[in-house]
C-alpha cells in the first residue's frame, strides 16, 4: 500500500501546479486587481503562497513516506491525510451551502483523493 503515498505525492504536485496556474488566473489575479484594501490583498497573497508551499512540502513528505517503512510513515500519512480531507470538506461544504451544488468549487475533487490515499497508505 505504500504506492498510495507515491500517488498522493504526484497528485499533490499536479494540484499545486493547477493551483499556481489556473487558480492564479481565476482567483488570485482578480482579487489583486480589485479595490479590496491593500492589507487584505497582502494577506490573501500570503495565504495563497502558503497553500502553494503546503502542496510542495506535502508532496516531498509523501515521496519520503513512500520510501520508508510504514511505521515511520504513519504519522505523516495520518496528519496530512486528515488535513487534505478536512480541506476538501471545507470546499465541498461551502460550495453546497452557498450554491447548492458541490461542483461550483470543485477543488475538493483533487484534495479528497490526496487525503484518502494518505490515510489508506498509513493503515
Image (cartoon, helix red, strand yellow):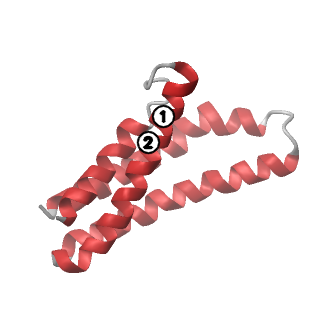
Residue 35 x %, y %: 87, 34
Q: Which residue is mark 1?
A: 93
The residue sitting at the front extreme is: 97
Q: Secondary structure at mark 2?
A: helix
Q: Which residue is mark 2?
A: 89
Question: Which corner quadrant holds the C terminus?
Answer: bottom left
Residue 111 x %, y %: 39, 45
Q: Secondary structure at mark 1?
A: helix
Residue contact between numbered discs 1 and 2, judged by CB atoms under 8 Å? yes
Can residue 6 be seen at all in this image of the molecule? no
In the rendered view, does 93 fall on the left or right side of 30? left
Q: Residues within 10 Å of mark 1 (few under 14, many from 20)?
A: some
Residue at 45% in and 37% down: 107
- The correct choice, above or below, for 60 with respect to 106 in the image is below
Question: Which corner quadrant holds the N terminus?
Answer: bottom left
- The correct choice, above or below, for 19 with respect to 76 in the image is above
Q: Residues within 10 Å of mark 2 (few under 14, many from 20)?
A: some
- Spatial CA span between label 1 and label 2: 6 Å
Residue 48 x %, y %: 62, 51
Residue at 46% in and 48% down: 87
Residue at 49% in and 19% down: 100
- The correct choice, above or below, for 33 with respect to 3 in the image is above
Q: Depth check: 102 or 48 in front? A: 102
Q: Quadrant of residue 122?
A: bottom left
In the rendered view, does 68 fall on the left or right side of 63? left
Residue at 60% in and 39% down: 24
Disc assigned to residue 18 = none
Can residue 23 be seen at all in this image of the molecule? yes
The residue sitting at the left extreme is: 1
Q: Quadrant of residue 73?
A: bottom left
Amino acid at each position: 500500500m505504500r504506492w498510495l503515498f507515491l500517488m498522493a505525492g504526484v497528485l499533490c504536485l499536479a494540484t499545486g501546479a493547477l493551483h499556481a496556474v489556473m487558480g492564479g488566473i481565476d482567483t488570485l489575479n482578480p482579487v489583486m486587481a480589485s479595490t479590496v484594501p491593500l492589507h487584505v490583498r497582502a494577506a490573501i497573497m500570503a495565504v495563497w503562497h502558503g497553500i502553494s508551499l503546503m502542496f510542495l512540502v506535502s508532496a516531498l513528505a509523501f515521496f519520503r513516506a513512500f520510501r520508508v517503512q510504514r511505521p515511520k510513515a504513519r504519522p505523516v500519512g495520518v496528519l496530512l491525510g486528515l488535513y487534505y480531507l478536512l480541506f476538501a470538506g471545507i470546499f465541498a461544504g461551502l460550495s453546497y451551502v452557498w450554491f447548492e451544488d458541490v461542483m461550483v468549487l470543485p477543488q475538493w475533487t483533487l484534495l479528497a483523493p490526496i487525503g484518502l490515499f494518505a490515510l489508506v497508505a498509513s493503515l
